[in-house]
Image (tube, rainbow, N blue to C red):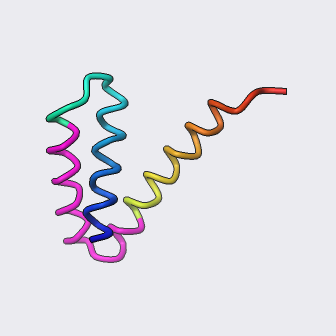
Amino acid sequence: MIGKLIGALVGREIDRRDGRGGFKGAVLGAATAGGLRRLGPLGLALGGAYVAKKMIDRRRAAAPKP
């Protein structure tokens, strides 16, 4: 279940990056979820780290600069 959630978040990040959204992110997110399951705990950690990094980068970009 957590792998599917991370796969969905990775797919959303891919859609945001290309700006068009839709099918490509959904397919790559599903493939990512399958790959994460095959890699086991290491894949889960790698996928979670990718999503966390993207969230941190987005917050830093939105934060007002002093």
Report the magenta stretch's main SS. helix
Residue furthest bottom as drawn = 41
The magenta span reads 25-45
Along the line of sight, the residue nearer the viewer: 62 or 48: 62
Side (left or right) of 22 relative to 64: left
- Percent coordinates x, y for residue 37 in the rendering: 22, 71
Q: Residue at x 50, y 53 (%)?
A: 52
**Residue 29 in magenta stretch:** yes
Q: Is residue 66 magenta-colored?
A: no
Q: Which residue is at a point 35% across and 68% down the rendered structure image?
A: 44
Q: Residue 35 location, x and y as percent? A: 20, 62
Task: Report the side of 28 relative to 13 (left or right).
Answer: left
Question: What percent of the width, then of the height, locates residue 8?
Answer: 28, 52
Res 20 → quadrant: top left
Residue, x 17% and y 35% (percent of image)? Answer: 24
Residue for point 36% across, 31% down: 16
Residue 58 horizontal side relative to residue 60, left or right: left
Quarter of the image where one finds residue 34: bottom left
Position of the N terminus by quadrant: bottom left
Q: Residue furthest right?
A: 66
Quarter in which the C terminus is drawn: top right
Taking the image as shown, residue 32 lies to the left or right of residue 19, namely left
